[in-house]
Amino acid sequence: MLERALAIKERSYGREHTSVALTLGNLGNAYAINERAYGRDHPTVALTLTTLGCAYVDSGDHAKAREVMVRALAIFEREFGRDSTFVATTLTNLGIAYGYLGDQAKKRDMLERALPIQEREYGRDSTQVATTLTNLGNAHSQLGDHAKAQHMLERALAIFEREYGRNHTNVARALNGLGCMYGALGDHAKAREVLVRALAIDEQHPGARAPDQGAGARPRPSGCGHHGARARSSQHLMNLGNAYGDLGDY
Protein backbone atom coordinates (compact mmCIF):
# COMPACT_ATOMS: atom_id res chain seq x y z
CA MET A 1 0.00 0.00 0.00
CA LEU A 2 2.80 2.41 0.85
CA GLU A 3 4.52 1.74 -2.47
CA ARG A 4 1.24 2.45 -4.29
CA ALA A 5 0.84 5.67 -2.31
CA LEU A 6 4.38 6.68 -3.27
CA ALA A 7 3.64 6.19 -6.98
CA ILE A 8 0.45 8.27 -6.75
CA LYS A 9 2.21 11.08 -4.90
CA GLU A 10 5.10 11.11 -7.39
CA ARG A 11 2.65 11.50 -10.27
CA SER A 12 0.72 14.23 -8.45
CA TYR A 13 3.52 16.27 -6.87
CA GLY A 14 6.82 15.18 -8.46
CA ARG A 15 9.73 13.26 -6.97
CA GLU A 16 11.08 16.12 -4.85
CA HIS A 17 7.85 16.96 -3.00
CA THR A 18 7.73 16.58 0.78
CA SER A 19 4.78 14.16 0.47
CA VAL A 20 7.02 11.80 -1.49
CA ALA A 21 9.71 12.02 1.19
CA LEU A 22 7.08 11.34 3.86
CA THR A 23 5.96 8.12 2.15
CA LEU A 24 9.56 6.97 1.86
CA GLY A 25 9.90 7.72 5.55
CA ASN A 26 6.86 5.58 6.32
CA LEU A 27 8.40 2.67 4.45
CA GLY A 28 11.58 3.15 6.46
CA ASN A 29 9.54 3.15 9.66
CA ALA A 30 7.78 -0.07 8.62
CA TYR A 31 11.18 -1.66 8.04
CA ALA A 32 12.43 -0.58 11.48
CA ILE A 33 9.27 -1.88 13.18
CA ASN A 34 9.47 -5.25 11.43
CA GLU A 35 13.16 -5.59 12.21
CA ARG A 36 12.51 -5.02 15.91
CA ALA A 37 9.54 -7.40 15.92
CA TYR A 38 10.98 -10.27 13.87
CA GLY A 39 14.76 -9.83 13.82
CA ARG A 40 17.10 -8.64 11.08
CA ASP A 41 17.00 -11.82 9.01
CA HIS A 42 13.28 -12.63 8.99
CA PRO A 43 11.45 -13.01 5.62
CA THR A 44 8.98 -10.30 6.64
CA VAL A 45 11.92 -7.92 6.95
CA ALA A 46 13.11 -9.01 3.49
CA LEU A 47 9.66 -8.29 2.03
CA THR A 48 9.74 -4.81 3.54
CA LEU A 49 13.27 -4.27 2.25
CA THR A 50 12.16 -5.22 -1.26
CA THR A 51 9.22 -2.82 -1.15
CA LEU A 52 11.55 -0.13 0.19
CA GLY A 53 14.01 -0.92 -2.61
CA CYS A 54 11.30 -0.45 -5.23
CA ALA A 55 10.36 2.86 -3.63
CA TYR A 56 14.00 3.94 -3.88
CA VAL A 57 13.99 2.97 -7.57
CA ASP A 58 10.85 5.04 -8.14
CA SER A 59 12.38 8.01 -6.31
CA GLY A 60 15.63 7.76 -8.30
CA ASP A 61 17.94 6.59 -5.49
CA HIS A 62 19.17 3.52 -7.32
CA ALA A 63 22.27 3.00 -5.18
CA LYS A 64 20.12 2.78 -2.07
CA ALA A 65 17.73 0.45 -3.90
CA ARG A 66 20.61 -1.86 -4.73
CA GLU A 67 21.82 -1.82 -1.14
CA VAL A 68 18.51 -2.89 0.43
CA MET A 69 17.70 -5.42 -2.30
CA VAL A 70 21.06 -7.15 -1.93
CA ARG A 71 20.25 -7.64 1.73
CA ALA A 72 16.72 -8.89 0.93
CA LEU A 73 18.16 -11.37 -1.58
CA ALA A 74 20.51 -12.85 1.02
CA ILE A 75 17.61 -13.39 3.44
CA PHE A 76 15.37 -15.01 0.84
CA GLU A 77 18.15 -17.31 -0.37
CA ARG A 78 18.86 -18.46 3.16
CA GLU A 79 15.18 -18.97 4.06
CA PHE A 80 13.73 -20.39 0.83
CA GLY A 81 16.69 -21.56 -1.25
CA ARG A 82 18.31 -20.11 -4.35
CA ASP A 83 15.51 -21.13 -6.72
CA SER A 84 12.41 -19.77 -4.98
CA THR A 85 10.02 -17.26 -6.51
CA PHE A 86 10.96 -14.81 -3.75
CA VAL A 87 14.55 -15.00 -4.98
CA ALA A 88 13.48 -14.61 -8.63
CA THR A 89 11.43 -11.52 -7.81
CA THR A 90 14.28 -9.92 -5.91
CA LEU A 91 16.75 -10.77 -8.66
CA THR A 92 14.57 -9.07 -11.28
CA ASN A 93 14.14 -5.98 -9.12
CA LEU A 94 17.85 -5.91 -8.34
CA GLY A 95 18.59 -6.22 -12.04
CA ILE A 96 16.47 -3.13 -12.69
CA ALA A 97 18.43 -1.19 -10.07
CA TYR A 98 21.75 -2.25 -11.61
CA GLY A 99 20.46 -1.19 -15.02
CA TYR A 100 19.61 2.29 -13.78
CA LEU A 101 23.10 2.47 -12.25
CA GLY A 102 24.56 1.72 -15.69
CA ASP A 103 25.87 -1.75 -14.82
CA GLN A 104 24.35 -3.69 -17.70
CA ALA A 105 26.54 -6.74 -17.07
CA LYS A 106 25.23 -7.04 -13.51
CA LYS A 107 21.69 -6.48 -14.75
CA ARG A 108 22.15 -9.30 -17.26
CA ASP A 109 23.55 -11.62 -14.59
CA MET A 110 20.63 -11.01 -12.22
CA LEU A 111 18.00 -11.52 -14.92
CA GLU A 112 19.67 -14.59 -16.40
CA ARG A 113 19.48 -16.20 -13.00
CA ALA A 114 15.85 -15.18 -12.48
CA LEU A 115 14.62 -16.32 -15.91
CA PRO A 116 14.78 -20.13 -15.49
CA ILE A 117 13.08 -19.87 -12.09
CA GLN A 118 10.23 -17.91 -13.63
CA GLU A 119 9.98 -20.28 -16.59
CA ARG A 120 9.65 -23.21 -14.21
CA GLU A 121 7.15 -21.52 -11.89
CA TYR A 122 4.97 -19.62 -14.37
CA GLY A 123 5.59 -21.33 -17.71
CA ARG A 124 7.80 -20.38 -20.64
CA ASP A 125 5.05 -18.33 -22.28
CA SER A 126 3.90 -16.38 -19.22
CA THR A 127 3.83 -12.59 -19.12
CA GLN A 128 6.19 -12.66 -16.14
CA VAL A 129 8.74 -14.42 -18.33
CA ALA A 130 8.08 -12.00 -21.20
CA THR A 131 8.78 -9.00 -18.95
CA THR A 132 12.10 -10.49 -17.87
CA LEU A 133 12.92 -11.36 -21.49
CA THR A 134 12.33 -7.73 -22.46
CA ASN A 135 14.64 -6.41 -19.76
CA LEU A 136 17.24 -9.09 -20.42
CA GLY A 137 17.11 -8.50 -24.16
CA ASN A 138 17.71 -4.80 -23.61
CA ALA A 139 20.70 -5.59 -21.38
CA HIS A 140 22.19 -7.90 -24.03
CA SER A 141 21.66 -5.18 -26.65
CA GLN A 142 23.46 -2.61 -24.47
CA LEU A 143 26.32 -5.08 -24.05
CA GLY A 144 26.58 -5.64 -27.82
CA ASP A 145 25.18 -9.18 -27.95
CA HIS A 146 22.54 -8.35 -30.54
CA ALA A 147 21.81 -11.93 -31.59
CA LYS A 148 20.75 -12.83 -28.04
CA ALA A 149 18.90 -9.55 -27.69
CA GLN A 150 16.91 -10.17 -30.86
CA HIS A 151 15.96 -13.70 -29.82
CA MET A 152 14.74 -12.60 -26.40
CA LEU A 153 12.92 -9.48 -27.54
CA GLU A 154 11.14 -11.28 -30.37
CA ARG A 155 10.10 -14.02 -27.97
CA ALA A 156 8.80 -11.42 -25.50
CA LEU A 157 6.93 -9.61 -28.26
CA ALA A 158 5.18 -12.81 -29.36
CA ILE A 159 4.06 -13.55 -25.79
CA PHE A 160 2.78 -10.03 -25.17
CA GLU A 161 0.91 -9.89 -28.47
CA ARG A 162 -0.74 -13.22 -27.79
CA GLU A 163 -1.72 -12.32 -24.22
CA TYR A 164 -2.61 -8.63 -24.60
CA GLY A 165 -3.15 -7.95 -28.29
CA ARG A 166 -1.04 -5.85 -30.65
CA ASN A 167 -1.65 -2.46 -29.06
CA HIS A 168 -0.63 -2.95 -25.42
CA THR A 169 2.07 -0.91 -23.67
CA ASN A 170 4.05 -4.09 -22.97
CA VAL A 171 4.14 -4.67 -26.73
CA ALA A 172 5.49 -1.13 -27.18
CA ARG A 173 8.31 -1.81 -24.70
CA ALA A 174 9.40 -4.93 -26.58
CA LEU A 175 9.18 -3.06 -29.89
CA ASN A 176 11.29 -0.20 -28.54
CA GLY A 177 13.97 -2.66 -27.48
CA LEU A 178 13.89 -4.28 -30.91
CA GLY A 179 14.11 -0.87 -32.58
CA CYS A 180 17.24 0.04 -30.63
CA MET A 181 18.73 -3.36 -31.40
CA TYR A 182 18.01 -3.06 -35.16
CA GLY A 183 19.57 0.40 -35.13
CA ALA A 184 22.72 -0.94 -33.48
CA LEU A 185 22.89 -3.62 -36.17
CA GLY A 186 22.65 -0.96 -38.88
CA ASP A 187 19.17 -1.96 -40.09
CA HIS A 188 17.77 1.54 -39.75
CA ALA A 189 14.73 0.95 -41.95
CA LYS A 190 13.63 -1.90 -39.70
CA ALA A 191 14.40 0.19 -36.62
CA ARG A 192 12.19 2.98 -37.93
CA GLU A 193 9.37 0.54 -38.70
CA VAL A 194 9.15 -0.95 -35.21
CA LEU A 195 9.77 2.35 -33.41
CA VAL A 196 6.95 4.04 -35.34
CA ARG A 197 4.66 1.27 -34.17
CA ALA A 198 5.89 1.53 -30.56
CA LEU A 199 5.30 5.29 -30.52
CA ALA A 200 1.79 4.88 -31.93
CA ILE A 201 0.91 2.43 -29.15
CA ASP A 202 2.19 4.71 -26.40
CA GLU A 203 0.26 7.64 -27.83
CA GLN A 204 -2.91 5.55 -27.51
CA HIS A 205 -2.25 5.10 -23.77
CA PRO A 206 -1.20 8.54 -22.47
CA GLY A 207 -2.14 7.79 -18.87
CA ALA A 208 -0.85 4.24 -18.70
CA ARG A 209 1.77 3.26 -16.16
CA ALA A 210 4.54 0.96 -17.29
CA PRO A 211 4.21 -2.70 -16.31
CA ASP A 212 5.79 -4.17 -13.21
CA GLN A 213 9.34 -5.35 -13.60
CA GLY A 214 9.19 -8.19 -11.13
CA ALA A 215 6.79 -10.99 -10.40
CA GLY A 216 6.58 -13.63 -7.74
CA ALA A 217 4.42 -15.79 -5.53
CA ARG A 218 1.89 -14.29 -3.14
CA PRO A 219 2.68 -13.05 -0.56
CA ARG A 220 5.56 -11.62 -2.47
CA PRO A 221 7.82 -8.63 -2.90
CA SER A 222 6.13 -6.30 -5.34
CA GLY A 223 7.73 -5.58 -8.68
CA CYS A 224 9.43 -2.28 -9.32
CA GLY A 225 7.70 -0.12 -11.85
CA HIS A 226 9.43 2.30 -14.17
CA HIS A 227 8.68 5.41 -16.15
CA GLY A 228 5.15 6.19 -17.29
CA ALA A 229 3.79 6.68 -20.80
CA ARG A 230 5.03 10.26 -21.25
CA ALA A 231 8.63 9.29 -20.48
CA ARG A 232 8.37 6.20 -22.69
CA SER A 233 6.96 8.25 -25.58
CA SER A 234 9.81 10.73 -25.20
CA GLN A 235 12.35 7.90 -25.31
CA HIS A 236 10.63 6.32 -28.33
CA LEU A 237 10.67 9.69 -30.13
CA MET A 238 14.39 10.04 -29.43
CA ASN A 239 15.07 6.54 -30.73
CA LEU A 240 12.89 7.16 -33.77
CA GLY A 241 14.70 10.42 -34.47
CA ASN A 242 18.00 8.57 -34.37
CA ALA A 243 16.65 5.99 -36.83
CA TYR A 244 15.51 8.69 -39.28
CA GLY A 245 18.85 10.45 -38.89
CA ASP A 246 20.76 7.26 -39.67
CA LEU A 247 18.62 6.87 -42.79
CA GLY A 248 19.56 10.41 -43.84
CA ASP A 249 15.97 11.63 -43.37
CA TYR A 250 16.32 14.79 -41.29
Image: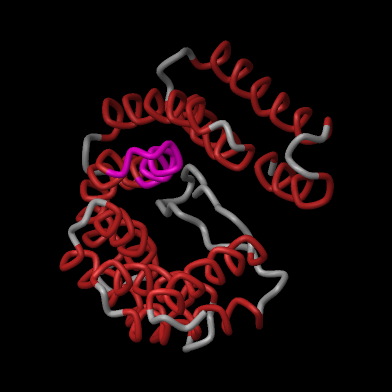
Q: Which residue is drawn at the image coordinates 50% and 79% (left, top)?
A: 198
| Picture quadrant of residue 151 | bottom left
Q: Which residue is drawn at the image coordinates 32% and 46% (left, top)?
A: 88
**x and y percent of residue 39 in the render?**
47, 13
- Near-viewer residue (233 or 168): 233
Q: Is residue 200 left or right of residue 127?
A: right
Q: How many numbered circles are shown?
A: 0
In the image, the segment drawn in magenta is 92-104
Question: Quadrant location of the N terminus?
Answer: top right
**x and y percent of residue 227 in the render?**
59, 55
**x and y percent of residue 210 in the render?**
57, 62
Q: Is residue 128 left or right of residue 136?
A: right
Q: Which residue is drawn at the image coordinates 47% and 45% (left, top)?
A: 220
Q: Eyeballing the image, is 125 above or below 115? A: below
- Near-viewer residue (238 or 232): 238
By secondary structure, the bulk of the magenta-drawn segment is best described as: helix
